[in-house]
Image (spheres, grey):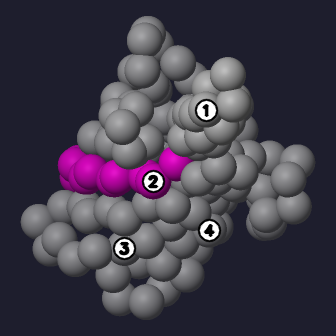
Amino acid sequence: MRCLLPAAALLAALAAPALGQQAGTYGVQGEAPGGQRYQGMAVLQPTGTNTWRVTWRVGNDTAEGVGFLIPEGPLLVVGYVIGREIGAVAYAVQADGSLQGTWTQGQGGGIGTEVLTPAGTGGGQVRK
């Protein structure tokens, strides 16, 4: 019985980050490949088991995407369209519910980074 309790605690700790992936509004803070910083908001909506719709609003731009959660990461991978360009982002789901992302977009490529923070947790306020 003693071995069962530590094993159960370890299993719960490993599963906790996957539970951090939640639907709702997120604050967005990022850096484009050229170093330009940006901020905005994103909305995550579940569409099925481990599948998500994501809408970003940054300035006057809106991007729409669909993605899936890889529970073993946990990693949320999203393909998106903004205007006439397509892009992809991979977010590492953190235990606190935030998402640490790396993205690319359009023919020019390059790698950008972005953090999505659940609204109401400090970093999630959208600044205009």
Q: Earlier in the sequence, mark 4 or mark 1?
A: 1
State the CA–CA distance, disc 4 to disc 1: 43 Å
> Are the two marked residues, 1 and 3, in contact with CB atoms closer than 8 angstroms?
no
Give the residue type at disc 4.
Gln
Q: Which residue is mark 3?
A: 112
> Are the two marked residues, 1 and 2, in contact with CB atoms closer than 8 angstroms?
no
What element does badge 2 sit on?
strand
* In the rendered image, the vertical position of residue 74 relative to residue 105, given as above or below: above
What element does badge 3 sit on?
strand
Which of the pair 17/90 is nearer the observer? 17
Residue 92: mark in rendering? 2
State the CA–CA distance, disc 1 to disc 2: 31 Å
Residue 73 in view (yes/no): yes
State the CA–CA distance, disc 1 to disc 3: 44 Å
Q: Earlier in the sequence, mark 3 or mark 2?
A: 2
Residue placed at 48% from the left, 86% from the top? 36
Q: Is residue 61 shown left or right of residue 120?
A: left
> Are the two marked residues, 4 and 1, in contact with CB atoms closer than 8 angstroms?
no
What element does badge 4 sit on?
strand
> Are the two marked residues, 4 and 3, in contact with CB atoms closer than 8 angstroms?
no
In the image, which residues are magenta?
A: 82-93
Residue 103: mark in rendering? none
Residue placed at 51% from the left, 61% from the top? 100
